[in-house]
């Protein structure tokens, strides 16, 4: 049974007023909490948001985070972008103030069963695919979380007989308390967000918190082929695996051209590999994970096959944009770390002009050297990480400093030949030049479409 929290009359502080913070403040205010929100940006930058929250009765502290605000609370909910090491949060924690992520608070009110997905790469595709399969299977289902819709804004739409499929980041999971998914999926653990977590171990530990409250009736689904993820296999829930490379004791694996689910010694074929429409071998892993989770949730093999067959993919994930003068353009703006860029490059046989760069997250771009040598013939660099990337890639392939996305697309269009691919797969965060990776991907697509119109004319 979930631990209950009564918000009416409680003093709740929301830290950070981006999408998640706004949704959390409104949720708590609607339930009678005495809500305050603190935001480093001044009011002139968030006038519309400030007016909306004040109308809901939320007290605002803008332009700074005052330490004294944090210690006089019953509950603090920081936005995912706020590090838990923030001194004011640490001080509140030290005197016993609960500090929860938004998904922790949302879960305590959520009805029905929860499927949670995390990993360094593939989260959004796998989350979306599970939701699509469950819908094809006829279950009431909603998709939320780090995928773009705060989980807390979907609480009122949840039902006792339904499923919520949630994408969770390390930032969200590091501040949970009792959060407990019925089915928890760990896709992979590769270096990412090291600028925040400090080490791969700390990053992996944050993700693995997803398992810590699970019990015997729950299920954990883990990538058996990943170098790190199996180390985090929990002892509480039933553990199921997925693998492209070998047969697993329990879970999903690739047997020739068939995806097979194995449970209690019994095997059943769920679908054939040729039914997967997504590009890249990494997406076979995503399908294996999604199929295992959906089967454990009660979806029949026929529904799983139909869901995979009809899944069109997700925006900004190796997304085809256009073909111009025999050159294909693909948007993989969601490739915000080195491993994601490796997977994107591997999805193409060669002759790639790749756009790299943005805000560095403490990454080692030298890891890209073999893949670039095999798959790419040029790299165009944008953003603040360009100096570091150029140094790490020295001598591998021709590199050009484009600076901006517009310049990168222009140069790529001039250098590309029929049969080439222009791929946006930055290996970096977007915040130096864009609001987020979605904004970056949309700008790239708009530039390509303008280029397409010019060529058509």
Image (spheres, helix red, strand yellow):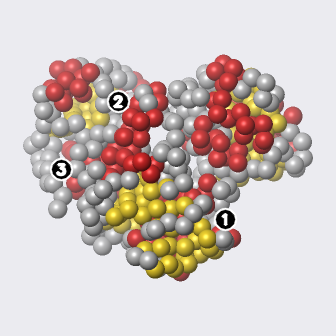
Q: Is residue 114 visible?
A: yes
- Quick one: label 1 or label 2, which is nearer the N terminus? 2
- Mark 1 touching mark 3, by CB under 8 A? no
Quadrant holding the N terminus: bottom left
Residue at horizontal 52%, vertical 41%?
190
Most foreground residue, 87 or 6: 87
- As drawn, the label of residue 83 is 2
Most foreground residue, 155 or 391: 391
Residue at horizontal 59%, vertical 61%?
244
Looking at the rendering, which quadrant does residue 422 occupy?
Answer: top right
- Mark 3 touching mark 2, by CB under 8 A? no
Which residue is denoted by mark 3 in the rendering? 31
Horizontally, residue 165 falls left or right of residue 406, namely: left
Horizontally, residue 34 falls left or right of residue 104, namely: left
Residue at horizontal 79%, vertical 50%?
349
Most foreground residue, 110 or 268: 268
Mark 3 vs mark 2, foreground winner is: 2
Q: Assign a secondary structure to mark 3.
A: loop
Looking at the rendering, which quadrant does residue 411 occupy?
Answer: top right
Quadrant holding the C terminus: top right
Which residue is denoted by mark 1 in the rendering? 277
Mark 1 vs mark 3, foreground winner is: 1
């Amino acid at each position: 049974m979930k631990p209950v929290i009564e918000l009416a009359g409680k003093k709740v502080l929301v830290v950070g007023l981006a999408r998640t913070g706004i949704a959390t403040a409104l949720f708590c205010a609607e339930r009678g909490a005495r809500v305050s929100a603190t935001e480093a940006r001044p009011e002139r930058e968030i006038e519309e948001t400030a007016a909306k929250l004040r109308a809901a009765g939320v007290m605002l502290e803008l332009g700074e985070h005052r330490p004294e605000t944090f210690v006089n609370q019953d509950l603090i909910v920081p936005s995912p972008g706020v590090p838990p090491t923030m001194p004011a949060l640490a001080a509140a924690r030290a005197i016993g103030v609960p500090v929860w992520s938004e998904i922790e608070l949302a879960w305590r009110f959520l009805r029905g069963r929860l499927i949670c997905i995390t990993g360094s790469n593939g989260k959004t595709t796998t989350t979306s695919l599970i939701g699509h399969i469950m819908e094809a299977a006829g279950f009431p289902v909603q998709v939320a979380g780090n995928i773009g819709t705060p989980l807390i804004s979907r609480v009122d739409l949840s039902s006792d007989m339904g499923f919520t499929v949630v994408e969770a980041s390390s930032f969200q999971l590091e501040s949970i308390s009792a959060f407990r998914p019925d089915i928890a999926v760990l896709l992979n653990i590769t270096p990412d967000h090291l600028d925040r977590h400090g080490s791969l171990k700390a990053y992996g530990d944050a993700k693995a918190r997803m398992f810590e409250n699970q019990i015997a009736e729950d299920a954990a689904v883990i990538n058996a082929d990943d170098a790190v993820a199996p180390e985090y296999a929990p002892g509480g829930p039933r553990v199921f695996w997925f693998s492209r490379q070998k047969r697993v004791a329990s879970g999903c694996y690739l047997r020739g051209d068939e995806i097979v689910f194995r449970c209690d010694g019994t095997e059943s074929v769920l679908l054939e590999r040729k039914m997967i429409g997504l590009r890249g071998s990494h997406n076979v892993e995503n399908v294996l994970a999604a199929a295992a989770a959906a089967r454990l949730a009660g979806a029949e093999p026929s529904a799983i096959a139909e869901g995979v067959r009809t899944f069109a993919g997700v925006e900004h994930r190796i997304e085809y944009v256009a073909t111009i003068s025999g050159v294909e353009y693909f948007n993989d703006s969601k490739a915000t770390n080195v491993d994601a860029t490796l997977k994107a490059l591997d999805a193409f046989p060669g002759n790639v002009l790749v756009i790299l760069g943005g805000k560095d997250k403490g990454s080692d771009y030298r890891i890209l050297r073999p893949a670039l040598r095999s798959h790419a013939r040029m790299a165009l660099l944008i953003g603040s990480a360009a100096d570091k990337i150029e140094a790490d890639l020295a001598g591998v392939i021709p590199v050009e400093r484009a600076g901006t996305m517009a310049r990168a697309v222009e140069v790529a269009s001039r250098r590309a030949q029929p049969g080439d691919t222009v791929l946006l797969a930055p290996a970096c965060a977007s915040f130096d030049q864009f609001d987020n990776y979605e904004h970056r991907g949309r700008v790239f697509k708009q530039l390509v479409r303008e280029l397409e119109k010019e060529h058509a004319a």
